Image (cartoon, rainbow, N blue to C red):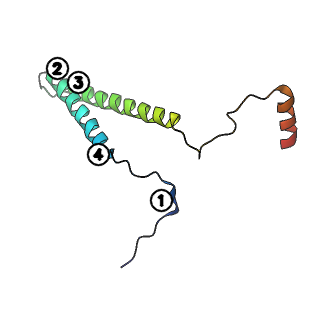
Amino acid sequence: MATAEKSPDAERSAPPDPWRWVKRGVAIGVLALGWVFVLWANRFHVTASTIISCIAFLAIELAVYNLLRTGARAVADDEESDDSTWGRPLGLKESSSARRRRS
């Protein structure tokens, strides 16, 4: 029987989120409630406009989810992605001397 070896990326990846299934359940619940509302507003007549409204609601929910993830990633304190270029602006003298050192 072959044993599964750890890939190098496995060590760098984040630990699994313990709330992952709760978040997914909430997202699916919100999606279901939104679709039920869209169907209720259309008196449960499944027409092309109802389907497009449900797809639009899904797109809105996914956009909000991605914006929340982007915002959380932007404010996260991450030492790996510490970029030294986002520092104090250099003056004219330091900027020109830094350019000369690079070339």
Residue 1 placement (x, y as % from top left): 35, 79
Which amino acid, by three-letter code, is at mark 4? Answer: Trp
Task: Tell me the tag on residue 41.
Answer: 2
Q: Which residue is mark 1?
A: 10
Density class for disc 3 (Cα within 10 Å; few <14, some 14-19, many ≥20) is few
- Measured Cα–Cα span from mark 2 to mark 1: 47 Å
Q: Quadrant of residue 21?
A: top left
Q: Please report the residue visible at 12 percent of the width from the left and 26 percent of the height from the top.
A: 44
For this rendering, which residue is in front, 51 or 99? 99
Q: Please report the residue visible at 31 percent of the width from the left and 40 percent of the height from the top.
A: 23
Residue 19 placement (x, y as % from top left): 32, 44
- Measured Cα–Cα span from mark 2 to mark 4: 30 Å
Secondary structure under the numbered disc 3 in the rendered image: helix
Q: Which residue is mark 3?
A: 49
- Measured Cα–Cα span from mark 3 to mark 2: 11 Å
- Measured Cα–Cα span from mark 3 to mark 4: 32 Å
- Measured Cα–Cα span from mark 4 to mark 1: 21 Å
- Quarter of the picture containing the C terminus is top right
Which badge, 4 or 1, is on the more N-terminal residue? Answer: 1
Of the two numbered discs 3 and 2 in the rendering, the one whose residue sits closer to the viewer: 2
Secondary structure under the numbered disc 2 in the rendered image: helix
Which badge, 3 or 1, is on the more N-terminal residue? Answer: 1
Q: Quadrant of residue 54?
A: top left
Residue 46 in sight from this viewpoint: yes
Density class for disc 2 (Cα within 10 Å; few <14, some 14-19, many ≥20) is few
Task: Tell me the tag on residue 21.
Answer: 4
In the picture as drawn, the residue positioned furthest to the top comes out as 41
For this rendering, which residue is in front, 61 or 91? 91
Density class for disc 1 (Cα within 10 Å; few <14, some 14-19, many ≥20) is few
Secondary structure under the numbered disc 1 in the rendered image: helix
Of the two numbered discs 3 and 4 in the rendering, the one whose residue sits closer to the viewer: 4
